[in-house]
Amino acid sequence: MNNEAATRRPIARSAIASALIPGLGQILLGQRYRGVGILLGFLVMLGTVVWYKDPVWYLSPVLIWLWNIWDAVGLAGGRARSLLLPVLVGLAAAYGIGWQVVEIDFRNADLDRAAAIVRPMAHPDFIQPRRERKQMWVQVQVPCSSEPPTARREEEGKVATVIPDCGVVGETLIVSVNGMWPNTETEVTWRTTIGDLKLVGEGESQMLVVTTDDAGSLTTTIRVPSTALVAAPDPSLPQFHRVYFDQYRPIGGVELSYIGNEVLKGALDTVAMALLATGLAMLFAIPLSFLAAHNLMGGNPITYVIYVAVRTLLNILRSIEAIIVAIVFVVIVGLGPFAGMLALALHSVAALGKLYSEVIEGIDPGPIEAIRATGANWVQTVRYAVIPQIVPPFTAFTIYRWDINVRSATIIGFVGGGGLGFLLVELIRVNNMRGVSAVFIAIAVVVIVLDYFSAKLRERLV
């Protein structure tokens, strides 16, 4: 009887302790990690449901609390309970709260709208029937200066005019052209001072197409695009834009379409951005990596301070996403691949610097100790004991980073960093889903091809 009472005392004590503070009973029984884990899990779940303020989810911390008492009783009796039950309760609550936070509701899905987007993507805009082009353009000033020049231009028997001679964003202009092919569809488009194409059809999302008359003339109205001055350094200063008139006639065969050409140019920009960024980053990351290696810089207080400073700098640069850095560089150097390349290079310096330094820290210390024993200085130690060991992994990491930068270059384009990402944003904005499909395919092809060649290159060099 006394033995039974003695057994019940620790069971009751553990149950009461865990009832008061989850995990305390486990700690008193010597299961410290288990008790601390239960307490932290209970507090996290309780804090989550209190923050979300949905009474339904209060059941999860209650169940964990009850299980915790049951577990303490079992431990006091010499039997540990499985942690699977509280883990499943916590995951179920987290998943349910996440479902509500994300506001998942399939009733809002519009299949007709999805079909309208996906259907044209089945026919990517890469090629078109081969054709000849007849083109005419005329300058127009936006906004108006005190004495705007006449918006009229003549070339090889063609004449194009804009009335009035200048305008502001949203203003209606009358555009005319003659001397074109008669009875032929003519595309009317707007190009900004930096050459960006702007559609002037309905909603600025459709191509404006007008058919010339029997004499090869047409007159129509357009509005100055709302995005005409987006990339302008100072939108208040008068700038010269162009209104283009383009006609096409089939001559047999096929050729790259306008979008196809832009996709190829964007793919080249993307690969070039990644290549230049990786090369530039490598030049800075290699010397920094030696300064960020503890086994090379931990010898005396001065070098250790340098090590801490460089390591901290690399961590700070690495913590800022390249797309954020790209926004800053777009402001500094303007839109285009140059800003994207600088952003990728800065982020890659930090990433490669960390990878390189970890390679250096992981090398065989034997050669280093042997070289130092001969009285060699720091530079000689690096030259003869470190560099021979790091060339293969450095090469592998550099190629791998180039692979990453190719993918990142696409995202950088979303904030004006050039390449395929910039083109993709423009096509999405004007709802050109055939062009979007072409960009998707180009991104996939570029990534797959570069991944294949980079893998082959690593096999040969490493």
Image (cartoon, rainbow, N blue to C red):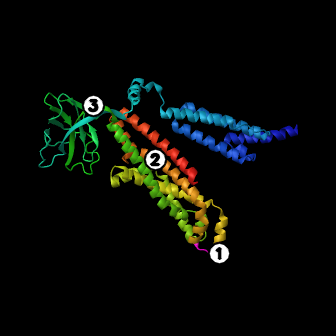
Looking at marks 3 and 2 on the same chain, the residue that comes earlier in the sequence is marked by: 3
Q: Name the secondary structure under disc 2.
A: helix
Please tell me whether residue 316 is drawn above or below residue 210 in the rendered image: below
> Mark 3 touching mark 2, by CB under 8 A?
no
Q: What whole-number distance in Å separates the C-alpha atoms at marks 3 and 1?
A: 79 Å
Q: Residue at x 33, y 36 (%)?
A: 257
Which element type, helix, strand or loop, lies under badge 3?
strand
Where residue 180 appears, as percent x and y from the top left, is 17, 34
Is residue 4 visible in the rendered image? The answer is yes
Answer left or right for 44 relative to 401. right
The residue that disc 2 covers is 406
Instruction: Give the prevailing secondary structure in the magenta stretch.
Output: loop
- Give the mark nearest the N terminus, 1 or 2: 1
Q: Seen in the image, is 201 located left or right of residue 96?
A: left
Q: Which amino acid type is shown beneath numbered disc 1?
A: Thr
Q: Nearer the viewer, residue 16 or 290?
A: 290
Residue 90, magenta (yes or no):
no
**The magenta stretch spans which residues?**
372-377
**Residue that appears at 56% across and 41% down:** 47
Q: Position of residue 424 (x, y in %)?
A: 38, 39
